[in-house]
Image (cartoon, rainbow, N blue to C red):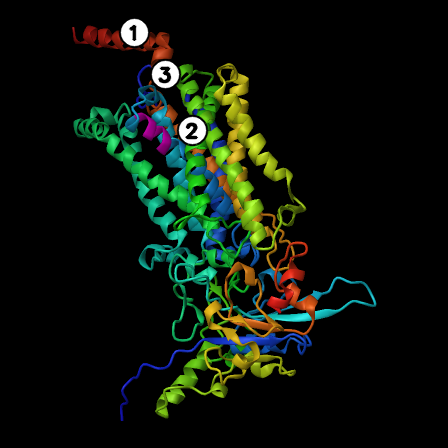
């Protein structure tokens, strides 16, 4: 029997990554590529033109042996909320063809591949380098195309792509909830592939608006300050630019938290207790 | 061979010499066209751009040609709206240069996008909040205005003007040209400004971002003003180059000096505004985001010299040369000032595109490096070759410079004598 479509609940999906748990194994990157049909080249040695929706950066504390410390920082798309309604995420506001937009029901920044005409203005706008251009035709080794996910459309040469927070998984979860006559999807029903693939359990994903979700309890987002974390050990990348990402990082280490943004000399000492 | 097309009284080189010149530049043009098709068929992997350098040489070329092509709208504004009548002697050429610059910009944009066949999406799915959308609309409309402004000059060709209909069209178009000049100035204000806004609104890029007025960052106004200021210097510079190549004086000194003087004052005002903008950005905007000037100018090619070169060598120096009568009237200093001015505005556009991409924003990121591929260089030189060919053709076949005949009365006399001799010969034959 046909059911009437109801206006579902609105979410604000976000991610928290515990950098103290991340080992830099790269499972999240592999899972992401596999899940989202991310194309690759025969020669991937030039990392600046190869696509990796989830990219792991290596940070060091800059000290010499034996005080050297390193930290791996996985970087998906930040799905920025932006400054205000006039300045949504840096990429959304600049796209001339409305090929990227923020979904008001999920907070996810989308990318419409068939509308993108490849001007790359969004890439210029993104300070996180989370957007990738298809410089080449997507090609998979013979037989491998059979392993492509039918839920995610492969992208053509000449368009920009990026992490979608595995949006197709959200659609599946929503379909399931619809069939079961539920308005809401459960936390475990929608998880990104990187979250599930992380062997250290460093990634937490969920609804930032829902106090019962683990991510909310971890970062304690402040709704009056664009979701700024109230957990002193949590931070967002480039907080000062007011891009207001929905991806949070957590670390006990002060130098790691400091690496999340740029500070003038002496500034960090003044803000570190407020900022994490 | 083609004398029937050459304006009356104008002395031009022989057709074979002209053809050899066109063929030489044409070879460069074909090289660019080859690279262009290579890019269209194989994609942007033919470039050295990458995910850090999504905006590169072509965007700079776009911004630069539109800035130096600003001479068309500003000279038109001065002539038709402010009524500076002397400028009628250079307006045709300013329009031709503007036409070349803007058509080049559109061509480069068509090469630069990853899916050229979807280029029309910018109009169909327009995001009104995007500076690039504003650029696309105003640039296309202004190009149409430039075509309209160029048509009367084309119709003045010796053969075309003989056709009564075209003669009337030409006459009537001249009558309403002030309307198009005003429209062109209006559109130029917006697209030049929007180009400035392209990086000014990038609030994720502290090197490019600027505060501003309402929805417009200060770069919006700086770009508009700089195009009006620097555009005429390129018009004069190309005029001087044509005079040098043809060995003829084509525009009287009083016209050149008047436009140069206006440009000089405009550049001075602009550069003062630019200095204020730089000081505010360096001391207020950037520090608020956690950056110092040294963070932006501390790597490889991008050192602090580039800021001084833009402001002093490409701004203050040419402005002063053009403002003072004595230096302005010295032909060597005048040409030096014009070259420095064009260098200055092109460097500004370079910095506002390529350096924005190069500067790392995340504290653990690195400076990005880029050097264009030969395909990018060839397609950037392509418009230069196209411009040289179009200027050569218009100079040869159209009365571009109204003062040419006035400056060379002996050639007019010779042409008149030749025409009279022909008439007498025909009369004699009839008799």
Query: Magenta includes B264?
Result: no
Which residue position holds label 3? Answer: B404
Residue B43 placement, left or right of A60: left
Question: Disc 2: which chain?
Answer: B
**As drawn, which residue projects farthest toward the right?**
A66
SS of the residue under disc 2: helix
SS of the residue under disc 3: helix
Q: Position of residue B347 (x, y in %)?
A: 55, 38
Residue B3, quarter of the rendered image: top left
Let me know if marks 1 and 3 both belong to one chain: yes
Tell me if residue B7 can be seen. yes
Which residue position holds label 1? Answer: B417
Question: Disc 1: which chain?
Answer: B
Residue that appears at 39% across and 56% down: A96
Number of numbered discs on residues: 3
Question: Disc 3: which chain?
Answer: B
């Amino acid at each position: 029997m046909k059911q009437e479509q109801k206006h579902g609940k609105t979410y604000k999906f976000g991610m928290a990554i515990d950098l103290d748990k991340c080992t830099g194994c790269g499972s999240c990157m592999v899972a992401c590529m596999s899940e989202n049909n991310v194309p690759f080249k025969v020669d991937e040695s030039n990392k600046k033109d190869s696509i990796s929706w989830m990219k792991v950066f290596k940070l060091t504390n800059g000290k010499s042996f034996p005080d050297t410390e390193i930290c791996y920082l996985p970087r998906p798309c930040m799905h920025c909320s932006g400054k205000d309604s006039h300045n949504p995420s840096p990429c959304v506001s600049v796209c001339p063809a409305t090929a990227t937009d923020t979904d008001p029901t999920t907070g996810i920044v989308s990318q419409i591949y068939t509308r993108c005409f490849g001007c790359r203005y969004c890439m210029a706008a993104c300070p996180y380098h989370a957007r990738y251009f298809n410089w080449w035709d997507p090609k998979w080794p013979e037989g491998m195309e059979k392993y492509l996910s039918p839920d995610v459309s492969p992208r053509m040469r000449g368009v920009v792509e990026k992490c979608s927070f595995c949006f197709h998984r959200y659609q599946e979860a929503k379909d399931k909830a619809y069939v079961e006559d539920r308005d809401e999807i459960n936390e475990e029903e929608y998880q990104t592939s990187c979250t599930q693939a992380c062997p250290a359990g460093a990634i937490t994903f969920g609804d930032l608006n829902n106090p019962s979700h683990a991510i909310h309890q971890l970062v304690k987002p402040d709704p009056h300050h664009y979701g700024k974390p109230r957990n002193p050990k949590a931070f967002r990348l480039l907080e000062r630019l007011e891009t207001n990402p929905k991806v949070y990082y957590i670390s006990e280490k002060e130098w790691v938290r400091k690496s999340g943004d740029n500070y003038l000399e002496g500034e960090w000492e003044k803000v570190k207790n407020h900022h994490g | 061979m083609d004398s029937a097309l050459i304006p009356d009284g104008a002395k031009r080189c022989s057709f074979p010499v002209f053809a050899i010149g066109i063929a030489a530049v044409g070879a460069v043009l074909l090289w660019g066209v080859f690279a262009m098709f290579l890019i269209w068929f194989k994609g942007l992997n033919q470039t050295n751009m990458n995910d850090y350098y999504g905006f590169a040489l072509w965007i700079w070329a776009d911004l630069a040609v539109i800035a130096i092509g600003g001479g068309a709208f500003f000279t038109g504004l001065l002539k038709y709206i402010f009524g500076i009548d002397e400028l009628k002697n250079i307006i045709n050429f300013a329009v031709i240069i503007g036409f070349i610059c803007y058509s080049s910009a559109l061509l480069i944009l068509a090469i630069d996008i990853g899916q050229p066949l979807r280029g029309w999406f910018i109009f169909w799915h327009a995001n009104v909040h995007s500076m690039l959308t504003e650029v696309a609309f105003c640039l296309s409309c202004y190009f149409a205005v430039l075509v309209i402004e160029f048509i009367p000059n084309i119709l003045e060709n010796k053969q075309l003007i003989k056709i009564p209909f075209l003669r009337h069209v030409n006459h009537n178009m001249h009558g309403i040209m002030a309307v198009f000049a005003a429209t062109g100035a209006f559109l130029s204000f917006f697209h030049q400004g929007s180009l400035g806004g392209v990086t000014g609104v990038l609030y994720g890029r502290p090197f490019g971002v600027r505060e501003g007025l309402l929805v417009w960052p200060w770069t919006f106004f700086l770009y508009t003003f700089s195009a009006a200021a620097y555009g005429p210097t390129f018009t004069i510079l190309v005029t001087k180059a044509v005079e040098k190549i043809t060995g003829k004086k084509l525009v009287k000194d009083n016209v050149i000096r008047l436009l140069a003087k206006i440009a000089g004052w405009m550049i001075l005002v602009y550069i003062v505004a630019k200095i204020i903008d730089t000081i505010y950005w360096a001391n207020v905007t950037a520090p608020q985001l956690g950056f110092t000037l040294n963070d932006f100018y501390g790597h490889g090619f991008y050192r602090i010299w580039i800021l001084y070169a833009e402001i002093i060598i490409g701004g203050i120096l040419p402005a002063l040369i053009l403002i003072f009568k004595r230096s302005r009237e010295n032909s060597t200093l005048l040409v030096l000032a014009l070259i420095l001015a064009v260098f200055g505005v092109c460097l500004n556009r370079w910095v506002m595109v390529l350096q924005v991409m190069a500067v790392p924003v995340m504290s653990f990121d690195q400076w990005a490096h880029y050097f264009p591929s030969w395909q990018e260089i060839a397609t950037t030189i392509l418009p230069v070759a196209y411009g040289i060919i179009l200027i050569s053709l218009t100079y040869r076949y159209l009365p571009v410079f109204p003062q040419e005949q006035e400056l060379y009365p002996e050639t007019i006399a010779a042409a008149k004598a030749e025409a009279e001799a022909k008439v007498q010969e025909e009369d004699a034959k009839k008799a």
